[in-house]
């Protein structure tokens, strides 16, 4: 064959392969969406040499993969649950779950709970040796040594097995109810119905307590040489008869507090519902007390008792909140302290001043108490609370009030030298010296822009927050929008911008706390920062010492999204992800220089054959002259000469998520971006900026010119534009439907359409009234119903529903605790009365969005069919054309 013929053949083959490759790119299916595997768990060994990662579909069995430092996969487990490395990094413990298919088959056969398959535990020596423990009920792994304690899943088997992971030593104890290791030693406690013992692998068992009744809340100090617990001699009297015990150095326990002690308020008891913990230096024990619970009158039948709620106008806490919090309040406790050295107990918090905050992990001599109860009524409409704040001496119990009606709660510095807070009313940071009782103002609006400059709700803006404190409370590091600043807590030294160039470069630097146990920011060590670039929407890792002002050193930055990495406890190895809309957030292994990384997982392989998508930042000017940004998502095979259906999906502002991957998922409330782009849709995600009192108009002014700018580009099917939003987004698309006929179809999830009726309602998911969110929150009216009636009417789509010409799909569930279900009913009934095409999906018993996976899948299918019909001229499914009568609901889906 001549050279020319060979060349022609190669060109033809190349063209054929190119076309074939393009044709191989297909649309994502619903099954692929449901089976999409995402990383749900990752952990790195303490020595940084091993990584375990769990890949899990939305429905199905998860797989766990183990990688070495070279990035080689050395083991896998299916189906897998939780995984954790041992203290020495020599072992990995993996919980194996029963296969979902097997479990569901047994459920169909009505198999009893006790006959269902149990978890298994794999003890995996990372040098390839595996050992299986079947029928696992529970286990605990020592944090300080390669030891494990576990129980099997059998009512008749109450044996606790305790062993070294290498099998060199093993013990077992019968009739064990509870067990656990000390955090920083290899000492174990285990309790039975009448005994509490400790076990030291080097010294054996020690009897700590013996006596009939109930032993509960067993707690070690960190080293395991002290142990505290509660004991009640009568199992039926645990509400009133608990006593607090302490044991030291494995000696028998002694009682240190009970209900007869005079430190307790009259009628109070030691509660089994409270936390029990040691201070870090083991000199104090904090425990819970409470008023003795009321006893029900057993001489009357329930049917002879009235069942009535009494709502009182001047109650501090609204009755609906009381009902919502009832079970929590029945278990509410108030902290007391036992000082071991002085053998004295004090009640620290009580019903009037219930909130306690300690410092230095309970070691500090002074703590803070606070209460917002005197101001609870105003919180109903203000949406925030005020506080009375006190100091309390941990050795004497003496209280001193330091603030009355403070507009925010105070926090304590790590060592407890200062209380600090942000005042939203004057946008300033303050400190209070615990030592000298003086207050210091660290910032003013003129000297430091501490507040959120993008705030657009009718309320005081929130602060950007703090990075933390340096050693011994010497300095507090605060954020502005971009930089990290060092402040003297007594305001005697001028503040210093430590990162220098953040505002100039529009880089928002934030400190990453790699070691969660660090109490302070060590300025002698290099610190890792994560920065977001407001101009490019990319992110990066940066190195900074924070000891002196300097431009942080770039380690890894670019047009992608980075998140907080996870560091090995005893090595500089980290695992992290880098993602874009097109690039799957696969797990990578690196050191803290980020000069070289190894890709471990390959989740992106799932999208290789799919017509994926691209993300593009766009900008335009709102109708009221505000520069805006948004993101346009297009199919990978986008052809500017074609006309595409478009779905406008938005909430508030999302352009900063330009590089977010959008993991395919049967979402509970929104379209799946990758599913729709792979099926030939364009998605437009515009930012919205609001003017107080006019949220609907603000949405219209921002979104509509954005859509117009897309139409002008020539690739939009003007008759195939839809909109979709949920909750606040659902309200906005419902409003747009009353102002424009541009949309061919709209899905509006859980929307408010009548601000008058919504204003006076209850958020049943919390018991709170809804008025605060209109006066100060997201709904952005900025006044009461009586102050601003026109704004409530103008922003309520219900009152102009007769102007709607767009087919509407509503999803609103009858157990919605965020937006009252009757809002969806008002919406549906109005459109039905006006004979507009409308459908309502109610996933019965579900909350603000469907939580059951089957319901989420169903919602996605119906929403897609709805848009396919109106935007792509596909036939109407049966549920839209004929409906599904109530008598057929259990038998037909109508897809």
Image (cartoon, rainbow, N blue to C red):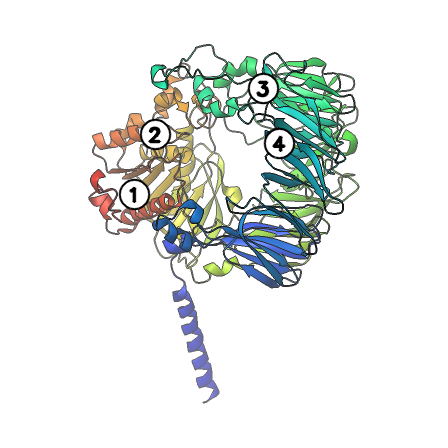
Q: Which badge, 4 or 2, is on the more N-terminal residue?
A: 4
Residue 228 position, x and y percent, is: 68, 30
Give the label, 1 or 4, closer to the camera: 4
Q: Is residue 673 visible?
A: yes
Q: CA distance from mark 3 to mark 4?
A: 16 Å
What label does residue 821 carry, if any? 2
Q: Which badge, 2 or 1, is on the more N-terminal residue?
A: 1
Q: Is residue 866 above or below residue 452?
A: below
What label does residue 744 carry, if any? 1
Q: Quadrant where the N terminus lies?
A: bottom left
Residue 606 position, x and y percent, is: 47, 59
Q: CA distance from mark 2 to mark 3?
A: 38 Å
Q: Secondary structure at mark 3?
A: strand
Residue 189, located in which quarter of the rendered image?
top right
Residue under the point 24% across and 44% down: 880
Residue 394, located in which quarter of the rendered image?
top right
Residue 332 position, x and y percent, is: 55, 23
What label does residue 217 carry, if any? 4
Q: CA distance from mark 3 to mark 1?
A: 60 Å
Nearer-the-camera pick, 820 or 180: 180
Q: Which badge, 3 or 1, is on the more N-terminal residue?
A: 3
Q: Which badge, 1 or 4, is on the more N-terminal residue?
A: 4
Q: Which badge, 2 or 3, is on the more N-terminal residue?
A: 3
């Amino acid at each position: 064959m001549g050279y020319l013929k060979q060349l022609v053949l190669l060109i033809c083959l190349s063209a054929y392969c190119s076309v074939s490759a393009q044709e191989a790119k297909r649309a994502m299916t619903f099954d692929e969406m449901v089976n999409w595997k995402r990383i749900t768990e990752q952990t790195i060994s303490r020595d940084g040499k091993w990584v375990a990662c769990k890949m899990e579909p939305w429905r199905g069995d998860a797989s766990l993969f183990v990688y070495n430092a070279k990035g080689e996969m050395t083991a896998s487990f299916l189906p897998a649950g939780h995984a954790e490395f041992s203290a020495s990094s020599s072992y990995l413990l993996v919980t194996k779950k029963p296969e979902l298919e097997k479990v569901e088959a047994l459920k169909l056969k009505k198999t009893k709970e006790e006959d269902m398959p149990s978890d298994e535990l794999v003890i995996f020596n990372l040098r390839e040796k595996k050992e299986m423990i079947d029928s696992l009920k529970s286990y605990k792994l020592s944090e300080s040594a390669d030891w494990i304690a576990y129980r099997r899943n059998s009512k008749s088997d109450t044996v606790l097995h305790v062993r070294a992971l290498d099998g060199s030593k093993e013990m077992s104890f019968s009739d064990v109810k509870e067990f656990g290791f000390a955090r920083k030693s290899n000492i174990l406690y285990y309790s039975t119905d009448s005994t509490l013992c400790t076990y030291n692998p080097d010294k054996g068992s020690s009897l700590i307590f013996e006596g009939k009744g109930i032993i509960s809340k067993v707690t070690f100090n960190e080293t395991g040489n002290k142990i505290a617990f509660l004991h009640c001699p009568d199992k039926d009297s645990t509400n009133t008869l608990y006593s607090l015990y302490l044991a030291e150095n494995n000696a028998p326990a002694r009682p240190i507090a009970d209900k007869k002690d005079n430190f307790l308020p009259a009628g109070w008891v030691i509660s089994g519902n409270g936390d029990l913990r040691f201070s870090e230096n083991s000199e104090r024990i904090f425990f819970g007390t409470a008023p003795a619970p009321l006893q029900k009158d057993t001489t009357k039948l329930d049917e002879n008792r009235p069942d009535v709620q009494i709502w009182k106008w001047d109650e501090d806490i609204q009755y609906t909140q009381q009902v919502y919090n009832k079970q929590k309040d029945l278990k509410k406790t108030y902290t007391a302290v036992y000082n071991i050295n002085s053998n004295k107990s004090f009640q620290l918090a009580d019903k009037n001043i219930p909130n306690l905050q300690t410092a230095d992990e309970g070691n500090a001599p002074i703590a803070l108490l606070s209460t917002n109860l005197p101001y609870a009524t105003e919180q109903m409409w203000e949406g925030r609370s005020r506080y009375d704040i006190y100091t309390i001496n941990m050795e004497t119990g003496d209280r001193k009030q330091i603030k009355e009606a403070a507009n925010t709660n105070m926090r304590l510095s790590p060592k407890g030298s200062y209380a600090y807070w942000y005042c939203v009313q004057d946008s300033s940071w303050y400190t209070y010296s615990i030592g000298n009782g003086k207050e210091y103002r660290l910032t003013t609006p003129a000297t430091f822009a501490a507040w959120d400059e993008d705030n657009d709700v009718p309320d005081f803006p929130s602060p950007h927050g703090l990075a933390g404190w340096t050693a011994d409370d010497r300095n507090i590091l605060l954020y502005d929008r971009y930089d990290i600043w060092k402040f003297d807590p007594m305001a005697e030294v001028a503040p210093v911008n430590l990162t220098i160039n953040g505002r100039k470069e529009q880089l928002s630097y934030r400190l990453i706390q790699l070691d969660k146990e660090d109490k302070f920011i060590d300025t002698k060590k290099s610190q890792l920062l994560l920065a977001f670039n407001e101009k490019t929407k990319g992110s990066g890792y940066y190195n900074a010492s924070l000891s002196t002002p300097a431009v942080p050193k770039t380690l890894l930055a670019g047009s992608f999204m980075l998140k907080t990495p996870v560091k090995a406890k005893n090595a500089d190895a980290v695992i992290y992800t880098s993602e874009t809309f097109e690039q799957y957030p696969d797990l990578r292994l690196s050191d803290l220089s980020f000069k070289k990384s190894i890709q471990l997982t390959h989740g992106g392989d799932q999208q290789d054959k799919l017509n994926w998508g691209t993300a593009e930042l766009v900008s335009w000017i709102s109708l009221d002259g505000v520069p805006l940004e948004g993101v346009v998502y297009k199919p990978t095979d986008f052809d500017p000469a074609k006309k595409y259906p478009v779905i406008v999906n938005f909430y508030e502002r999302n352009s900063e998520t330009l590089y977010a991957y959008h993991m395919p998922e049967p979402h509970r409330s929104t379209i799946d971006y990758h599913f729709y782009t792979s099926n030939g849709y364009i998605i437009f995600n515009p930012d919205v900026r609001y003017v107080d009192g006019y949220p609907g108009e603000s949405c219209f002014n921002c979104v509509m010119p954005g859509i117009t700018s897309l139409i002008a580009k020539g690739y939009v099917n003007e008759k195939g534009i839809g909109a979709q939003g949920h909750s606040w987004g659902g309200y906005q698309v419902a409003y747009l439907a009353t102002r424009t006929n541009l949309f061919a179809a709209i899905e509006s999830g859980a929307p408010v359409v009548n601000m008058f009726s919504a204003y006076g309602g209850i958020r049943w998911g919390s018991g709170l009234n809804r008025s605060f969110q209109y006066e100060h929150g997201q709904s952005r009216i900025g006044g009461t119903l009586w102050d601003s009636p026109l704004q409530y009417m103008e922003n309520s789509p219900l009152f102009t529903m007769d102007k709607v010409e767009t087919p509407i799909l509503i999803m609103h569930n009858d157990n919605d605790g965020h937006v009252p279900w009757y809002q969806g009913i008002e919406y549906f009934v109005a459109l039905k009365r006006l004979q507009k095409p409308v459908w309502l999906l109610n996933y019965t018993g579900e909350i603000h969005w469907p939580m059951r996976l089957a319901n989420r899948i169903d919602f996605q299918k119906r929403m897609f069919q709805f848009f396919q019909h109106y935007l792509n001229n596909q036939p109407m499914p049966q549920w839209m054309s004929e409906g599904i009568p109530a008598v057929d609901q259990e038998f037909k889906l109508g897809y």
